[in-house]
């Protein structure tokens, strides 16, 4: 007890004697020497076994003496940014925003609020633009697509977000996960590192994190991140990402601690600090890449010193809840604690061109009692970012034919929703049976889609159901809607993709 009281007194005396900014402490490579209050903060922070409970709003416990000292010092400071989020009070309310103090290793995935009605063509325009970026091929839009107005992609496209903590002390950030991307970025407040640009309103500021490090251009980490030196600029490592829907993000590459849960963190996570407008991402703070590339979170956590995560198999999994469910989904890293006997696996393979994507050998489908073969050498990848599932035109034609024959009297004319394959079940029995849709792979593994994997509802509250499939020549895509309510497991080291039973979340 005497030790902690002495520590508090010494720290307060040091604070009274100092007045300079602590921003240099975030960049040890630049040779900044911590001022006395910074040293005091470091001294007390080092004495504490945990820091996230101080800034995680959902943790209800009495702080230990070192944490109490840290809070006392924060109160004596003119700014609270040294402890929690700077300038903007964006503390998420429980339980919607989640908390870093989870009692297990599952990160909750939270469904974004959807509008009352969605034009299905918005799904198509988003997905087609995404395909153009992922596959590097131009996409030609049919004339009826051109009247679709782009809106906030997070609320309109039924995406799932999570709250992660960046820095030390950690600042909660609302992010979306994407298996089709490698690079991760968040919006950043850069006003205190002599940057000419900064994203206004961003809650994460690298200068306020004890563990942040600036990545310099020309360094191995900058090259790994795909960054570059700016002509006529300083020695920062710059990045830029552009999307086909006219949105883009650019900024500076940093390294900092990433807290996934209370028990799991990545100590030296490479990511981009966005300093410019990112277009249609709405209230998102950023994007976390889960692709196969070395910069993705899935690869970076595999190489981190997180003893609480068994990454010997380099696994991660997620479960996207049913669109009719109020449950949260989840994302996990490391070997699962539960038995995997109810999960079936098929082989993944690396594409010779699209190295970051997760390809599988989809060879046939069952639609009802009808067997439908996929074209020979058809290529298919699994994508969490695409909303719909895309299959070859001849396969799509057979699928829609089966459903139109089955539900002919409920069929909605194509000119109402443009897509075709939409049905009005208002007058149908409550538990009307629907044909099964099963994906079959070359090794005999089968994936039985749930109701939500087959249909999506463009008008919540109404019994409208549209087939969540669209015809696409070339590469096929198993999209997010097909994956609903099933745990999807990515065993990267062994190149296995697993499918859990229906109702996994």
Image (cartoon, helix red, strand yellow):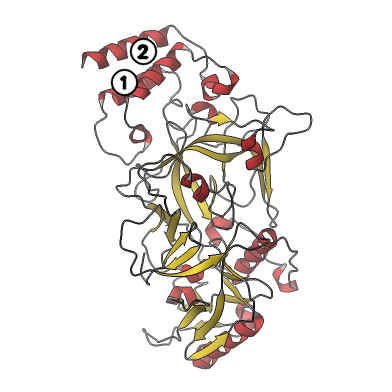
Residue 334 position in % (x across, y down) = 40, 52
Which quadrant is home to the C terminus? bottom left
Question: Which mark sits nearer the N-terminus, 2 or 1?
Answer: 2
Q: Which residue is mark 1?
A: 69
Of residues 337 and 46, the one nearer the viewer is 337
Of residues 400 and 362, the one nearer the viewer is 362
Occupied quadrant, residue 374:
bottom right
- Verify CB contact (< 8 Å) between mark 2 and mark 1: yes
Residue 359 position in % (x across, y down) = 57, 66
Numbered tag placed on residue 11 in the rendering? 2
Disc 2: CA contacts within 10 A as few (<14), some (14-19) or many (>=20): many
Determine whether, in the image, residue 21 is placed left or right of residue 501: right
Q: CA distance from mark 2 to mark 1?
A: 9 Å
| Element class at badge 1 | helix
Of residues 366 and 11, the one nearer the viewer is 366
Residue at image location 53% in from the left, 58% down from the top: 155
Compared with 343, 393 (above or below) is below
Residue 202 position in % (x across, y down) = 54, 37
Residue at image location 31% in from the left, 49% down from the top: 104
Of residues 311 and 380, the one nearer the viewer is 311
Compared with 262, 334 (above or below) is below
Residue 144 position in % (x across, y down) = 71, 73
Residue at image location 25% in from the left, 14% down from the top: 3
Occupied quadrant, residue 111:
bottom left
Which quadrant is home to the N terminus? top left
Of all residues shown, which one is farthest toward the left?
A: 1
């Amino acid at each position: 007890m005497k030790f902690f009281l002495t520590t508090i007194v010494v720290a307060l005396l040091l604070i009274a004697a100092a007045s300079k900014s602590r921003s240099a402490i975030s960049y040890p490579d630049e040779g900044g020497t911590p001022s006395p209050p910074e040293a005091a903060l470091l001294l007390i922070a080092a004495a504490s076994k945990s820091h996230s409970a101080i800034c995680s709003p959902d943790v209800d416990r009495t702080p230990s003496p070192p944490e109490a000292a840290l809070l006392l010092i924060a109160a004596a400071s003119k700014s609270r940014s040294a402890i929690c989020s700077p300038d903007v009070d964006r503390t998420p309310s429980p339980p919607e925003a989640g908390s870093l103090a989870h009692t297990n290793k599952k990160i909750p995935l939270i469904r974004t609020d959807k509008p009352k009605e969605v034009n299905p063509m918005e799904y198509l325009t988003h997905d087609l633009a995404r395909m153009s970026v992922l596959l590097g091929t131009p996409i030609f839009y049919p004339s009826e697509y051109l009247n679709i107005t782009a809106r906030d992609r997070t609320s309109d496209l039924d995406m799932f977000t999570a709250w992660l903590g960046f820095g030390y002390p950690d600042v909660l950030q609302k992010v979306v996960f994407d298996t089709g991307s490698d690079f991760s970025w968040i919006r950043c407040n850069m006003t205190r590192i002599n940057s000419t640009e900064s994203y206004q309103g961003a809650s994460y500021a690298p200068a306020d994190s004890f563990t942040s490090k600036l990545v310099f251009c020309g360094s191995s980490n900058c090259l790994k991140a795909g960054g570059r030196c700016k002509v006529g600029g300083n020695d920062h490592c710059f990045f830029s990402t552009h999307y086909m829907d006219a949105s883009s993000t650019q900024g500076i590459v940093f390294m900092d601690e990433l807290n996934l849960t209370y028990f799991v963190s990545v100590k030296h996570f490479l990511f981009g600090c966005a300093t410019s407008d990112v277009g249609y991402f709405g209230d998102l703070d950023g994007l976390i890449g889960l692709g196969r590339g070395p910069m993705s979170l899935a690869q970076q956590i595999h190489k981190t010193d997180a003893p609480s995560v068994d990454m010997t198999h380099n696994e991660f999994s997620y479960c996207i809840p049913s669109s009719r469910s109020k449950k949260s989904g989840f994302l996990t890293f490391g070997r699962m604690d539960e038995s995997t006997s109810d999960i079936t696996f098929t082989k993944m393979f690396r594409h010779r061109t699209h190295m970051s994507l997760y390809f599988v050998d989809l060879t046939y489908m069952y639609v009802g009692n009808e067997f439908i073969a996929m074209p020979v050498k058809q290529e298919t990848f699994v994508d969490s970012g695409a909303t719909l599932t895309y299959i070859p035109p001849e396969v799509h034609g057979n699928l829609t034919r089966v459903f139109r024959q089955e539900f002919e009297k409920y069929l909605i004319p194509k000119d109402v929703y443009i897509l075709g394959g939409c049905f009005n079940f208002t007058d149908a029995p409550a538990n009307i049976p629907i044909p099964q849709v099963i994906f079959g792979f070359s090794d005999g593994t089968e994936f039985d889609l749930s109701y939500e994997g087959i249909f999506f509802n463009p008008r919540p509250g109404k019994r409208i159901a549209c087939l969540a499939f669209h015809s696409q020549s070339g590469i096929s895509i198993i999209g997010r809607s097909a994956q609903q309510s099933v745990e999807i497991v990515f065993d990267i080291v062994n190149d296995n993709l697993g499918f859990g039973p229906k109702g996994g979340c």
